[in-house]
Amino acid sequence: MMSKEASILRFDGVSKIFTSGLIKVSKTTAVNDVSFEIKEGEILSLVGESGSGKSTIANMILRIIKPNLGQIYINDQEIEKIPINDYYKQVQMVFQDPFSSFNYFYKVDRVLHQAVNFHYGKKISDTERTKHIHNALKLVSLNPEEVLGRYPHQLSGGQLQRFLLARILIIEPSVLIADEPTSMVDACARAEILNLLKRLRKEINISIIFITHDIGQAQFISDRVIVMENGLLVEQGPTKKVFLDPQHRYTQNLLASVPSLYRKWN
Ligand SMILES: Nc1ncnc2c1ncn2[C@@H]1O[C@H](COP(=O)(O)OP(=O)(O)OP(=O)(O)O)[C@@H](O)[C@H]1O
Ligand SMILES: [Mg+2]
C-alpha cells in the first residue's frame, strides 16, 4: 500500500564527518553515503546500536547540522534552500527528554499557544486558539482542565510527551522525527506514546521517522525499517521482511539479542 504513495523526504548519498581535536585531529564518519526515502504517511524506524549515526541523521533532517556530502530533499526540493520558518512548518521533532522542550519557568500552555500562533498566525482569536488547543489535547487523551495552567515539573514525563504530540497535531507538519521518544518514560506510558504516534499518522497522514534501539518497538510501530551500523545503512525493507528474514550479519546479531521477537512471530 505504502509504495504507491509519493516520497516526501529523500536522502541522496549523504555523509557527515565530524572532526574534533586541535593538535591531533580525529575524524568520525558518523553517516557514510546514506540514501533512503520516506513516503507520505509512512512510519519508518531507524535502528542500530549506540553511535551508529541515528541522531546525526535526525539532526541533519532538522538542519541542526549540515551534511558534508550528498543532498536531502523534501518534496523534491533541497531542504537548505527552504526558508527555515517554512521548513519547520513541514518538519518537526519530539526528543528523548520531554522536559528539554519546555521552559521550566513558564506554564506548559505556552508551548501550545506558540504552536497555534506559528500555524495560524498571531491574529487568531482567543476562542479559536482555545478550541484548537482543547481539540489537540483531547486527541492525545489529555484532559485540558487537568494539564493547562500547570508548570512542566507538575506533569509526568509521559504526560509531557503526549502534550508535545498535541503540539504536533496543531502544527500538522508532514514529517515528524521522533528520536527515542519513549526511553525516559515507564512501560505503560511507552505503549501509550507508540499508540499515539500511530494515531497521529492516521489523523494527519504524517510521515514519522522513529529512532530507537529497541527492535520490539520498531516491530510494533513501523511499516519499514532501516538498519544502521557505524554510519552505514546496512539493510532496509518492510519491517516484517527485515526482522523475519534479515540479510545482513549485523541485523541478524541485533535480532539475536531479542529472542522473544521470534517466539512471537513464529
Ligand atoms: N557533534 C559531534 N562531534 C563529534 N562527533 C560526533 C558529534 N555528534 C556525534 N558524533 C559521533 O558520531 C557518531 C554517531 O553518533 P550519533 O549520535 O548519530 O549516534 P546514535 O546512533 O544516535 O547513538 P545513540 O543510540 O547512542 O543515540 C558517534 O561516533 C558520535 O560519537
Ligand atoms: Mg542518538
Image (spheres, helix red, strand yellow):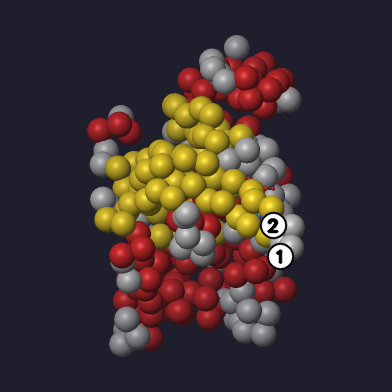
Q: Can residue 25 be seen in this view?
A: yes
Query: Residue 260's mark?
Result: none
Label 1–label 2 contact, CB within 8 A: yes
In whole angstroms, how far apart are the C-alphas of marks 1 and 2? 6 Å
Under tag 2, what secondary structure? loop
Answer with the quarter of the image where residue 42 lies: top left
**Would you place residue 233 above or below residue 41 in this image?**
above
Where's the N terminus, which quadrant?
A: top left
Under tag 1, what secondary structure? loop
Answer with the quarter of the image where residue 13 lies: top left
Residue drawn at x 58%, y 40% as measured from the top left? 231
Circle 2 residue: 25
Q: Can residue 146 be seen in this view?
A: no
Assess disc 1: are there few (<14), some (14-19) or many (≥20) residues with their C-alpha within 10 Å of its C-alpha.
few
Residue drawn at x 52%, y 34% as measured from the top left? 233
Q: Where is residue 90 in the image (x, y as percent from the top left)?
A: 35, 61
Assess disc 2: are there few (<14), some (14-19) or many (≥20) residues with their C-alpha within 10 Å of its C-alpha.
few
Near-viewer residue (89 or 147)? 89
Q: Amino acid under label 2?
A: Val
Near-viewer residue (60 or 205)? 60
Q: How many marks overall?
A: 2
Query: Residue 22's mark?
Result: 1
Q: Amino acid under label 1?
A: Leu
